[in-house]
Structures are given as structure tokens and as C-alpha cells.
Amino acid sequence: MKIKSSASRLSGKVKIPGSKSHTIRAAAIAGFAKGESLIRSPLVSSDTISALNAFEAMGAKINRCNDEFWKISGVAGRPSAPAGEIDVGNSGTTLRLAAGLAALNDGGRAVRFTGDHQICSRPLQPLLDSLSDLGAEAVSINSDGCAPVEIKGTLKGGRTSIECRTSQYLSSLFLCCPLAEQSSEIEVPLLYEPDYVGITLDWLDKQGIQYSCTEDFSNVRIEGSQSYRRFDETVPADFSSASFFLCAAALCGEDVVIEGLDYSDSQPDKAVAEYLRKMGADIEINENGSTAVRASSLTGIDIDMNRTPDALPIMAVTAALADGTTRLYNVAQARNKETDRIKCMAEVLSKIGADIEELPDGLIIRGGNKLSSGEVSGHYDHRIIMSMAVAAIAGGIELDIDTAEAVDVTFPTFPELMRSIGGKIDRVEQN
């Protein structure tokens, strides 16, 4: 499938769907709680459905109702091991969080996880080592530190040290260790994307889970023999999804209002609004949760993106359409997402005329060049595809972007919502 996107002027109101990060964490806790939980306004996407399927395979009972809310009856901290493997599709969050929770099984049979070709190339060994340190048996089947993996219980607790080049490793341990028999002490000499750990802790705090940690998460203690209880919660809107609308509106919007964003939430990509303000964007955040954005003359700046790697593709596009030079740096982990996003964004933006330089840990973009229409690869990466759609809408050009089916990973309604405020964007089936 392709997305065809072209020059547009945007105006009107748009409501952003629920957060992927919050939805998967809510599903994980509900799946391992005692009793039936209610998750309201979840994100419905291929990633979140992969999470539901994983927790259901380990014994949770799931009723998706009409997708306005989900009812999940949990396994009370003791998952079962399915006979077959669990395929997480393209969801790295599901793989890492579910792998930790699978370590709570009784050890009689291993839980085996696999995924698509991207998932099977993404590193997992540090988490496997820590789960093994804490009493489970966790191995990479092909001995390459990636999926497919097998996890056999039972997680007991103890001590481990882990370098977290993705915060999902630490979030996984935060979710599974409270259900271990003994307390766990975790040394974290390296942690990228700490705000995503903050999202995990928001859910643990609602559950009353006992833990302690230093401000930088370098030392963590999680008390054992705890449990999750049933809950009724609403999923906050997704700032990562909102970033495409914030940037598009700042480049070519006429009184665009983005609704439902809670800037007190822990999601790191709320920083995109501040990045845009520093570039000169006209952004007004209102008390009712709406954000009004009008097109402005943007100027390049330096942005440390270590806390917001998922925003790199759309900020690279925004920088290409701004005046002056923008440097996106300290985000080497963007090379280990669904794709090497640093390399891929340099490639696709260069192809349409942007002046962009690849750095080991980011990009330098010299804005102001006229972009050209054409065909580009989305690299099967949802954030690259959506970013390049914005490049066409705001850059006054027309682009055909392939592998567009990958948008369904996190934001299946992206084209429809962009069209609702005037964006010229369509899905096109390929023969």
C-alpha cells in the first residue's frame, strides 16, 4: 500500500487517539491483576492488538467490547505457557514487556516469543541477562541476542545490572519484579528515554506498588511478593501521534486546534510543542486541554533528542522546511528502532532535495531548500511514513510513500484525521 500526500492548508479541530505506551502498560497490568479491569479509550492498532494477543496467550481473558473500552480478567500474577509461540508482530514494546512478565510462569514450559523481520533484528540480550540473573531462564534461540526468545520461570528476585539503550528493558523489570517472590535490586549504569520509565511508574503508583529509586534511575529497588489489582482507567491521548499534527500545523496551519492533550502526563513527546516554540511556532496551550497552532516562520535550532527519539523523523522534516540550520543530536538509539531512523531520514529527505547530513548520533539539516515531488520509501516504519506525508502537505509537493500499511502499527486513523483538517492524503492500494 502507498500513501499519496500533497500540498495542503490545514484548519479545524482534531482529537488525538489514545497513547500506545499507556495502552500497552494498562493491558499488561490488567492481564496480570486479580479480577476484571476496564480500560477506556484504548488505542486500537496492530501494536496494541499484539499486546492483547500476547497477554491472552498467557492466560488473561479479554473482551474488546466495541473498542471504546476493553475488559480484561487477569491471571493474578501467574501466567501459563501456551503450546505455540507468541507472535508480537512489529511491537517491540509488547515483546520486551511481555518477556519480563512471562518469566513469572511456573517454569514447566518455556514461553516462546517471535515477531516480524524488524523485531527479530532488534536487541534484547540485556533484558534476557537480567531476567536470568533474577531467577528465570531467558535465552535467544539463535544466540544473537534477538527474537525468537524463550522465557522459562520462575522469576525469584535478587540483584542485576543492566544497560538500557532502550527504556523498555527497565520498564519490563519494573512490571514483573513486584510479582517475584523476593525483592529485586537493579543497577542501571545507562538509561535512554527515562520518561517512558516514568509512564510505567505512573501505572505502578496507581496500583500502590512499593519501589524506590534514585532520581536518575541508576539504582532501583522493587519490593517482592506484591500484586496488581483490578482497575478502571482512561488512556491519555498520544503525544507521539500528536507530534505530526503539531508540526504540520506549525508549518501550514490556519487556526488548527488539537484536542485532548494532557501536558502534565509523563509522555516525553510533549516536548515537541516546546521544540516548535523555540523554533518560532505560534502555539497556545489552553487549560481545557486543547492546543491551538498557527503557521509561523520557523528557524532552526539545536535539539538534544535523547528523551524523544520517536520524534526524530517529524522534527527532521520540520527542520528541512524551516529557515537556517537545525542539529538533532544525542539520539544514537534512534538507529535501533523499527529502522535505523537516522540513516533512513537522511536518505529519504536527501532524495527530495533536503540538505541533510548524517551524524553518528543524529542529523544536521540545513533548511530552506525547495523540496521536489516524487516517490520515496517508507521503510516499513510508521513514523517515517507519517513524517514524509507531512513533508508533502507542508512542503508544497506531492509524494507517493510506499509500505504505508505500517502506519497501522500505532496510528491507523492518521490519514482520516489529517483529511478532517484539510490534508490531501489518501491510501492507494498497489497491484
Image (spheres, rainbow, N blue to C red):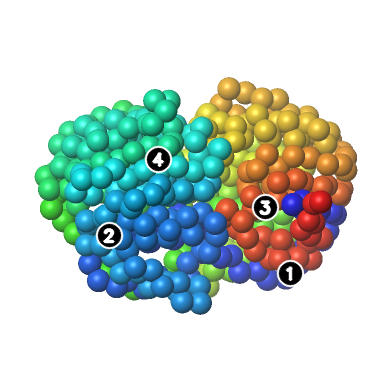
- Does residue 181 appear to the left or right of 127 in the view shown? left
Residue 328 seen by the camera: no
Q: Is residue 385 visible to us here?
A: yes
Q: Mark 1 touching mark 4, by CB under 8 A?
A: no
Residue occupying the point 33% across, 53% down: 82
Q: Amino acid at mark 1?
A: Ser
User: At which x and y percent is residue 211?
Assistant: 20, 49
Q: Circle 1 is placed at which residue position?
A: 420
Q: Secondary structure at mark 4?
A: loop
**Mark 4 = which residue?**
167
Q: Secondary structure at mark 1?
A: helix
Q: Residues within 10 Å of mark 2 (few under 14, many from 20)?
A: many
Q: Residue 221 falls in which quadrant of the image?
A: top left
- On the image, the x and y values in percent for residue 309 come to 53, 40
Callouts 1 and 3 close, C-beta under 8 Å: no
x then y, percent, for residue 266: 42, 54
Q: Between tags 2 and 1, which lies in front?
A: 2
What residue is disc 2 on?
Answer: 32
Give the camera-side residue of 182 and 370. Answer: 182
